[in-house]
Image (cartoon, rainbow, N blue to C red):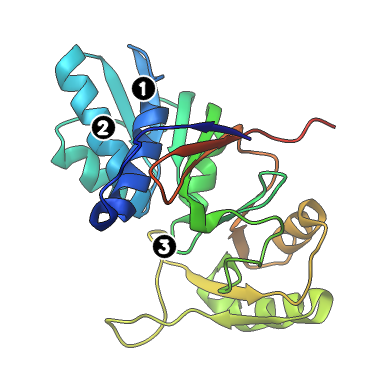
Amino acid sequence: MTEVSLSKTPNPQLLPRCCRLGCATLRISVLINNQVVGVGSGSTIVYAVDRLAERVRQEKLNIVCVPTSFQARQLILKHGLSLSDLDRHPELDVAIDGADEVDASLTLIKGGGGCLTQEKIVAGCAKHFIVIADYRKDSKALGQQWKKGVPVEVIPIAYVPVSRAIARRFGGEAVLRMAVSKAGPVVTDNSNFILDWKFEHAQNWKEVNTAIKMIPGVVETGLFVGMAERVYFGMEDGSVKIRDPPVN
């Protein structure tokens, strides 16, 4: 793993922002003119879009952005960036997103914010998929840092049978995610429900991802296997560590 120093003496009071902004700045700096960019969701992406908008203004770049969620769409519009969609731009040059957890093989858990399906679709349409995250998302194995389980988006009518099928086949418990500021469950941008599968032990994530998606009623899982090309971790001291997939 490569480490790139961004600040020798970061202000401790600004460390959370420093980590995220440093990570975002490093990645966005390699973007070039006339690209179509997939914009992910989550707290870290806010800083990435800030930096992207800054470069577009300063360098007069022609960048078109495709969002992965309502949040991403609002960020793009807020900064006055060019907004598009997969109808007009079905092939992206790069997609940039965060992650809830990243293991040593660059397998990701995503979907803590409920946008997993659109995030995976956009990432799958990109020639390059890059992840930016802070150091707290770095794990040797999934489940070490992220304790909320693997999100699974489901058709509302199917949440009970899907929950039972996952627990029966893979163990653990798949729980319907409940909303905080409204009565009832979380509803995704696609009008679906989310189950959070709290698994008990390490799995063959590629096989598990495929098997869960075959259960009737499942829309998508928050397991991103073999998709990330590189991950940039913003460290506590303001530096950035870069991780590429292991060489087999």
Percent of width and height locating residue 164:
72, 83
Q: Which residue is mark 3?
A: 113
Nearer to me, 76 or 183 = 76
Three-letter residue code for mark 3: Gly
Above or below for 41 versus 66 = below
Percent of width and height locating residue 211:
79, 60
* Crowd rating for badge 1 (residues with CA inside 10 Å; few <14, some 14–19, many 20+): few
Q: Which residue is mark 1?
A: 29
| For marks 3 and 2 on the same chain, the one whose residue lies earlier in the sequence | 2
Per the rendering, the mark at residue 51 is 2
* Crowd rating for badge 3 (residues with CA inside 10 Å; few <14, some 14–19, many 20+): some
Secondary structure found at label 1? loop
Q: Is residue 82 visible?
A: no
C-beta proximity under 8 Å, tags 3 and 1: no
Above or below for 34 versus 137 = above
Percent of width and height locating residue 131:
50, 40
Dividing the picture into quadrants, the one containing residue 223 is: bottom right
| For marks 1 and 2 on the same chain, the one whose residue lies earlier in the sequence | 1
The residue drawn where x is 42% and y is 81% is 185
Secondary structure found at label 2? helix
C-beta proximity under 8 Å, tags 1 and 2: yes
The residue drawn where x is 31% and y is 46% is 18
